[in-house]
Amino acid sequence: MREKLRNLSPEAFTLFSALVGIALAAALALTRVVAFGSFRMMVAVFLVTDLALYVMMKAGIIKSPRDRRANT
């Protein structure tokens, strides 16, 4: 699984990260102790973060997993 994650393009990484974020928001929404808002607010926070990471990867500010592997 790690090998597959290391070869992801920025687009695939963003999609995978968004799916994980939605699942995490669903899990956090079930527990009031660690929830930091409603389910919709948590999903919005995770998706905006994923979008910001995608833009930074495309702009070259940070490297995507595939680019990091190519340089090592």
Image: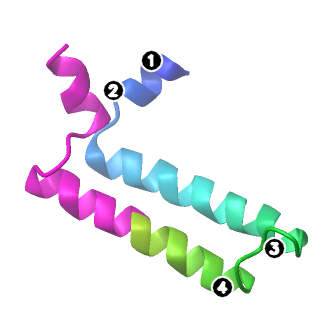
Marks 3 & 4, CB-CB < 8 Å contact? no
Per the image, label 3 sits on a secondary structure element best described as helix
* Label 3 – label 4 distance at C-alpha: 9 Å
Q: Nearer the viewer, mark 1 or mark 3?
A: 3
Residue position for label 2: 7
Per the image, label 2 sits on a secondary structure element best described as loop
Marks 4 & 1, CB-CB < 8 Å contact? no
Marks 2 & 1, CB-CB < 8 Å contact? yes
Residue most toward the left? Answer: 59
Residue position for label 1: 3
Is residue 36 shown left or right of residue 15?
right
Q: Position of residue 9 (x, y in %)?
A: 28, 40
Q: Main secondary structure of the magenta part?
A: helix
Residue 67 is one of the magenta-drawn residues = yes
* Label 2 – label 3 distance at C-alpha: 31 Å
Residue at the spot 51% in from the left edge and 60% down from the top edge? 18
Amino acid type indicated by mark 4: Arg
Amino acid type indicated by mark 3: Ala
Residue position for label 4: 40
Amino acid type indicated by mark 1: Glu
**Of label 3 and label 4, which has the lower sequence position?**
3
Classed neighbour count for the residue bearing mark 4: other residues with Cα under 10 Å, few (<14), some (14–19), many (≥20):
few
Per the image, label 4 sits on a secondary structure element best described as helix
Q: Residues in magenta?
A: 50-72
* Label 1 – label 3 distance at C-alpha: 31 Å
Residue position for label 3: 29
Quadrant where the N terminus is found in the figure: top right
